[in-house]
Image (cartoon, rainbow, N blue to C red):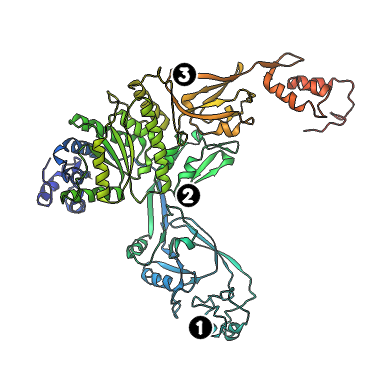
Amino acid sequence: MHSALCRREAGAFQKAIQTGQDVVVACTQEQRLFSELAEQTQGAVSVIKFVNIRETGGWSQDAKNASPKIAALLAAAHLPEPEPVPVVTYKSQGKVLILGAMDEAERAAALLSDVLEVAIFAQGPGSAGGAQTRRYPVLAGRLTALTGWLGAFDVSWEDNNPINLDLCTRCNACVEACPDNAIGLDYQVDLSLCQSHRACVKVCQSAGAIDFGRNAVAHTERFDLLLDLRPAAASPTFNQHATPQGYVRWDGKDLKTLLDLRELVGEFEKPKFFAYKQKLCAHSRNETVGCQACVDICSAEAISSDKSRQQIKVNPNLCVGCGACTTVCPSGALTYGYPSASEQGQKIKTLLTTYTAAGGQEAVLLLHSQGAGQALIGELGRAAQLRVTQGVPAHVIPMGLWHTASLGLEVWLSAVAQGAHQVVVLLTAEEAPQYAEGLQAQMAVAQGILNGLGYTGTHFKLIHETTPVGLDAALQALKATRQKVPAEPARFAVAPEKRATLELALDHLMACAPTQAESSPAITLPAAGSPLGAVRVDKDRCTLCLSCVSACPASALQDNPQLPQLRFIEKNCVQCGLCVTTCPENALALQPRLLLTPERKQAVVLNESQPYACVRCSKPFGTLKAIEAMLGKLAGHSMFQGEALQRLKMCGDCRVIDMYSDPQETRIGDLPVGKKRL
């Protein structure tokens, strides 16, 4: 270990990275310097990691108490890198389409054309119109579709204007001749202004670019990149919060946008952030939709419903890796892949156990993004050094995530079970609005569980801040809060499966709960976002058709092969609602709750009925209630009178035997007269 390691101790750093042992540099300000130094050092073979210590501990009014936190951050920095996962590949040759007014598009094209292959889709002339010299291919017409991602954008449009831009020489004769001022310097006719004088056609005879009789032609062309100069309100395409890679909006001011666009030529990779297990998915059964939490929360519109295949579809090219879908997924069908839940859980456990072992108390886990969240914490640390703010408190342990929406209640509850007094999620302006709603709903469920078990206080909190001063005030307010936590920290590891982790956390929290189950056998949970609960059955409506059993993706609803019974294991229920939407009698309802008694893990009977025996052979073939309901509905129908009604009381075999043994019926071929094959 070296103290005060900075530029003056570059030699010590070079010696350390030649040993082959992992090297941790506890400062991020000089990350670029030390990274370049490592590249230039001969024989450097060590793995180098950087961890933010100064901004979160050293630059704080509470720095003298920050040793346990520093120990925790250093211990976490020594953890191995996440296991590699499959990658998603993009290939771009630099073919870019610029959408916008002609004058603005040509200005942008001039800044890109030396690196990229530029084409323009004109959306009006703009204030100045296009240049007289035609330097770039220009498309125009009515846009019909924009789809795709980096390297594979498909643009569809209708060339529905009388002026053919391929033939137009930009001589401006038509602009000057038009008495209606219907032709702009984008060399397109505004048909709403045109009064059909056709003066433009006469002056364009030599070029022949204007033809009011030509039919609209549909076109589709593929581009690698899209640069959109149109106002957001005027461009309904790609208005989702997370736009596809390779699609860029530009306000005409920030040149960094164009500089970044110029770099998007070549082959690129990103991790495939998610893993999907269709068997666990509670989205649909028999084309009936139950849970669609992932579809609703995805800010990239990368997830869609495929009811015919009883699953959802995730487009890895559109996925931005926010992980919000995995957070709200109740069954664990969608899991976050990079880093995995187990790797994140190991990091949290390392932070908490090291912090406690070093003498730290009342740990608060601060989850933030590696982008804007990390930058804001750094600004807070620098402001603390200048005595403008107090800085990150000593008991607040920051943990960077690819995205703050990637962890949910099963990991939060595990953190509390392992010793965290509070889990705080920092949101900046980079998150989609639905992320905050989804996280808040998850926190309400998790908080309801803890409070119901007798753990008083507020254990989960969302902080929305974009300024160091605002973040400082929010973090200092955490000092005044007190939370009750388990007396003995849990030792379990976060499992790869979401439901398994949730059960481990619940088992520990229930075992150490200040409130015993006898005084409150069940905790009522919020309906929004709860992955736990029961199913209520209206026994007057239920006919025990068991369609809900076939629809249940989690085997929470089960039948009994020996008796007409509907059984239920509450631990398995994910509250997807498929049983409710499937039930033909509207006899089911969800009941979000956490049952604290042992019956939660046992099969209990929700409804049962006497079996109905065939009146001919006495073999049970249905339930008494179902047959009585059928007889009541069909008794007045003209086709079910006399012997036909009696046959409804028979099993399938006896019904056929009775029909063919009736001497009163005359048959043609193999069907009784008057009967139709169904």
Q: Along the horizontal axis of the image, is 253 left or right of 194? A: left
Amino acid type indicated by mark 1: Asn
Q: Which residue is mark 2?
A: 301
Q: Residue furthest top?
A: 618
Q: Along the horizontal axis of the image, is 337 left or right of 363? A: right
Is residue 623 visible in this depiction of the protein?
no
Determine whether the residue tagged by mark 1 lies in a helix, strand or loop.
loop
Determine whether the residue tagged by mark 2 lies in a helix, strand or loop.
loop
Amino acid type indicated by mark 3: Glu
Determine whether the residue tagged by mark 3 lies in a helix, strand or loop.
helix
Q: Along the horizontal axis of the image, is 149 left or right of 425? A: right
Is residue 186 visible in this depiction of the protein?
yes
Numbered disc in front, either 2 or 3? 3
The percent position of residue 491, horizontal first and vertical second, equals 29, 26
Q: Which residue is mark 1?
A: 172
Which of marks 1 and 3 precedes in the sequence?
1
The percent position of residue 323, horizontal first and vertical second, equals 40, 43
Position of the N terminus, as image quadrant, is top left
The percent position of residue 504, horizontal first and vertical second, equals 37, 26
Please tell me which residue is depicted at 43% across the width and 54% down the height of the picture: 243
